[in-house]
């Protein structure tokens, strides 16, 4: 358990299932506000993760929920994903997200010490936190190819983009921690800081492409200039 003044970050359990509905609602609301996609999860799914001890929750001493993240396993435990990171608007940029990511990362290493830990994110802040834990940006080909994982993207508004790129790229940036072959967190953090402007531009153009697609209402959407710049960054 981690405690910072009035904030408690800990492994979730069966006593936390009453938060499941609130968490899924906040996930959906947050995704819409950012204008990005997210693979939807049901309250029942979130509750199950809590009961299995495969989730981390953040709340105030009075029990007010403020953050959450959970573990998923793929390819018979060869890959682990730390998914669904969400923090209530009032506590963003307060260090809560970083605390949750650190605890869920440690929990993943405890439960699956030999697994590769990966994540997909549309946020520069999450990329920064991941880099401080030792994650590196990678291509989608280095992630699990488990069909069940990719099937989870079907509820994402960007699913058609993912499939049009033959699952080689999408709006999210892939990051990976390989316990058998990885740089030290200090090195990945330094690399991210040096390349942060490049990552920021990439994420902005991905966002631009999504908005153009949404406004045009056409499959593939987006201006030719947006697509050209995105293809330049992604090497497509």
Image: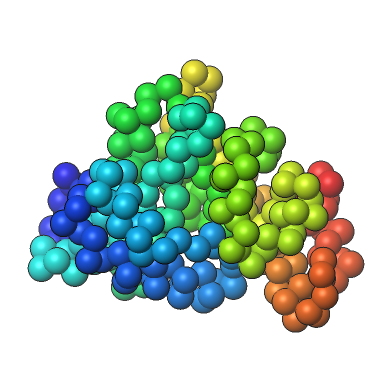
Q: Residue at x 62, y 48 (%)?
A: 150
In this image, 142 relative to 96: left or right?
right
**Would residue 166 be seen by someone viewing this image from the given angle?**
yes
In this image, 2 relative to 207: left or right?
left
In this image, 63 relative to 147: left or right?
left
Q: Residue furthest top?
A: 180
- Above or below for 178 versus 135: above
Nearest the eye: 54 or 59: 54
Q: Position of residue 100 (x, y in %)?
A: 32, 50
Q: Residue at x 32, y 50 (%)?
A: 49
Q: Position of residue 171 (x, y in %)?
A: 66, 57
The count of marks equals 0
Q: Position of residue 29 (x, y in %)?
A: 46, 75
- Above or below for 211 versus 188: below
Q: Residue furthest right?
A: 224
In this image, 164 relative to 76: left or right?
right
**Would residue 189 be seen by someone viewing this image from the given angle?**
no
Q: Residue furthest left?
A: 62
Q: Position of residue 138 (x, y in %)?
A: 63, 37
- Above or below for 9 versus 222: above
Q: Residue at x 15, y 51 (%)?
A: 3
Q: Residue at x 67, y 40 (%)?
A: 140
Nearest the eye: 122 or 124: 122
Q: Which quadrant is home to the N terminus? A: top left
Residue 47 occupies quadrant? bottom left
Residue 201 occupies quadrant? bottom right
Residue 133 occupies quadrant? top left
- Colouring style: rainbow
């Amino acid at each position: 358990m981690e405690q910072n003044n009035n904030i408690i970050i800990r492994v979730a359990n069966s006593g936390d299932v009453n938060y499941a509905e609130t968490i899924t609602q906040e996930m959906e609301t947050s995704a819409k506000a950012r204008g990005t996609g997210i693979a939807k999860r049901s309250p029942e799914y979130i509750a199950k993760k809590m009961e299995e001890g495969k989730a981390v929750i953040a709340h105030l001493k009075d029990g007010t929920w403020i953050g959450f993240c959970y573990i998923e396993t793929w390819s018979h435990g060869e890959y682990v994903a730390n998914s669904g990171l969400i923090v209530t608007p009032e506590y963003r940029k307060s260090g809560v997200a970083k605390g949750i990511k650190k605890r869920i990362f440690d929990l993943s290493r405890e439960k699956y010490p030999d697994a590769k830990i990966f994540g997909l994110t549309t946020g520069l802040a999450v990329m920064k936190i991941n880099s401080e834990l030792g994650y590196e940006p990678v291509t989608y080909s280095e992630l699990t190819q488990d069909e069940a994982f990719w099937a989870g993207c079907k509820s994402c508004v960007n699913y058609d983009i993912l499939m049009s790129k033959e699952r080689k790229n999408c709006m999210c940036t892939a990051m990976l921690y390989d316990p058998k072959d990885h740089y030290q967190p200090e090195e990945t953090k330094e690399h991210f800081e040096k390349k942060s402007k490049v990552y920021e531009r990439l994420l902005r153009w991905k966002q631009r492409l999504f908005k153009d697609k949404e406004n045009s209402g056409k499959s593939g959407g987006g201006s030719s200039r947006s697509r050209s710049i995105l293809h330049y960054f992604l090497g497509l």
